[in-house]
Image (cartoon, rainbow, N blue to C red):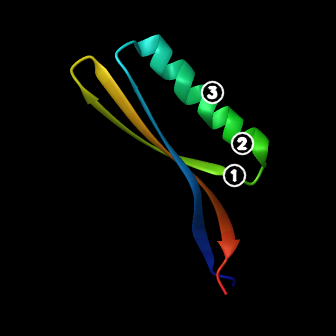
């Protein structure tokens, strides 16, 4: 069986105090990255501090490890 590895391509951070805006920005970024190449995958990490929401988005592809 082949070994696969994550190859990180790009990162983005989204910060907002408006919930609807935050959700819209995260959705737009993920959509943009997935439309660039169908093999792109996105890892998302969320954090919140009071009203402020933060998302770290990591775009990557899975490739064969040689």
In the displayed structure, does residue 34 sit left or right of residue 22? right
In this rendering, would 52 be left or right of 32? left
User: SS at mark 1?
Assistant: loop
Q: Answer with left or right where residue 6 lies relative to residue 21.
A: right
- Mark 2 or mark 1, which has the lower sequence index? 2
In the picture shown, does residue 10 fall above or below 63?
A: above
Q: Are marks 2 and 3 in contact (CB under 8 Å)?
A: no
For the point 34% across and 25% down, the residue is 53
* Number of marks: 3
Position in image of residue 59 (x %, y %): 59, 51
Residues at discs 3 and 1 in contact (Cβ within 8 Å):
no
Disc 1 crowd rating (10 Å Cα; few below 14, some 14-19, many 20+) is some
Which percent across, then down, holds residue 26?
53, 29
Occupied quadrant, residue 49: top left
Using the image, tell me which numbered label, if any, was put on residue 34.
2
Label 2 vs label 3: CA separation?
Answer: 10 Å
* 3D distance between C-alphas at marks 2 and 1: 5 Å
Counting residues from the N terminus, which is met first, the one under dot 3 or under dot 1?
A: 3
> Of the numbered discs in the image, which one, if any, rests on residue 28?
3
Q: Relative to 48, say whether 2 is above or below.
A: below
Precedes in sequence: disc 2 or disc 3:
3
Q: Looking at the image, which residue is at 61% across and 33% down?
A: 29
In this image, 43 relative to 7: left or right?
Answer: left
> Distance from label 3 to label 1 (Cα)?
14 Å
Q: Which residue is mark 1?
A: 40
Badge 3 density bin: few <14, some 14–19, many ≥20, Cα 10 Å: few
CB contact under 8 Å: marks 2 and 1: yes
Residue drawn at the location 70% of the way across and 35% of the way down:
32
């Amino acid at each position: 069986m082949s070994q696969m590895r994550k190859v990180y391509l790009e990162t983005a951070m989204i910060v907002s105090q408006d919930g609807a805006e935050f959700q819209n920005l995260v959705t737009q970024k993920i959509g943009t990255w997935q439309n660039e190449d169908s093999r792109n995958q996105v890892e998302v990490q969320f954090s919140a501090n009071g009203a402020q929401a933060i998302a770290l988005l990591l775009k990557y592809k899975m490739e064969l490890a040689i």
